[in-house]
Amino acid sequence: MIEPRASKVPSSRRRTSLNSAVAIFLATCVISTVAGQEVISPGEPTKLTRVRYSYPSLSSDGAMFVLEASVSGNWEIYTLRREGMGDGGEGLVQLTSNRDLDRMASWSPDGRHIAFISDRSGNFDVYRMNADGTHVVQITDTPEAEIHPYWSPDSRSIIYNRRVANQRLYAIWITDAAGSQHQELLRDDQLNSYARISPDGQWIVFDKWWNNDETNGEIMIMKRDGSELKRLTENDVYDGYPAWFPDSRRILYSSEVDGVFKLFWISIEGGEATQITFGAGGDQRAGVSSDGQTIYFNRNLDGTIELYEMPVPEELRSVSQE
């Protein structure tokens, strides 16, 4: 999870430098057992491009990523063509260009707009622009930082996190896409972040710093109106960066395993979680393609952030398409 603090630059608790590359998993998945839990072990990845980027978001048609990249030393928003990526970064198109920081971009499900954050107004606010980078509109304008903007499934609303004034806390807010109506959904004495609305529009998943302990994030869900709050994970490690499977019944997230982030999934009913990535490097900021066939995520290898893609496990594909 990213939290802007004293610095103007938002930074992860564990992330080091943001040198980046792109890679694709070209292997089948096999089932094994670790510590009594069913797990899925992917094959070796193949790197296809070498660009610096993070926070990927895949378009609904699966053709393009939008992401933040520090290609020239400053964080800007880019799109990256998914197919035919080459070593020279072919298919990378820069959408923003200024001296300020533009970060945390996400596609609207209808493919028409991109939400992102920028500190061009003096602190981090949420902005919206057309998919080609034109017609930039400021959505939030407060003295507090707003981060992690994500779209509702109908592309009419943006959910985001707003820092609570003079506190190390974030609340969950939602606004219409024009930025004219803002509503606070959740604020308590703990940090709540990375909120995302389920594809059926009924639920919100987010991570909460349990007892406001930054080393103990937990995955939470609640109804879209902020009711029926439910805790899904309960352990002594950090669980965060949640994303929905298309069926709105399962959640993909990152959890620390022996001090390294790996991907897991869990049902909205709770119960046992299943690990699906292994090997070197920390896996975070994952998403699932809208057709339920592909998982994409960032992997941090010795400070180098890379983009990976892998097939959704076969046993999850059928339920994802129900």
Image (cartoon, rainbow, N blue to C red):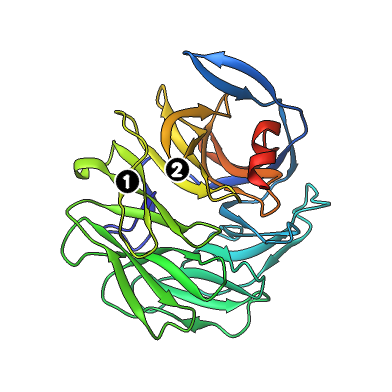
Residue 281 is left or right of residue 81, and the answer is: left
Q: Which quadrant of the structure image shows residue 280?
A: top right
Q: Which residue is mark 2?
A: 268
Q: Position of residue 322 (x, y in %)?
A: 66, 47
Q: Nearer the viewer, residue 13 or 311?
A: 311
Q: Residue at x 67, y 70 (%)?
A: 111
Earlier-in-chain disc, 2 versus 1 = 1
CB of mark 2 within 8 Å of CB of mark 1? Answer: yes
Q: Nearer the viewer, residue 180 or 308?
A: 180
Q: Position of residue 244 (x, y in %)?
A: 53, 49
Residue at the extreme right of the image, as rendered: 84
Q: Which residue is mark 1?
A: 230
Residue 246 is left or right of residue 3, and the answer is: right
Q: Which quadrant of the structure image shows residue 159?
A: bottom left
Q: Nearer the viewer, residue 273 or 171?
A: 273
Q: What amino acid does circle 2 point to?
A: Ile
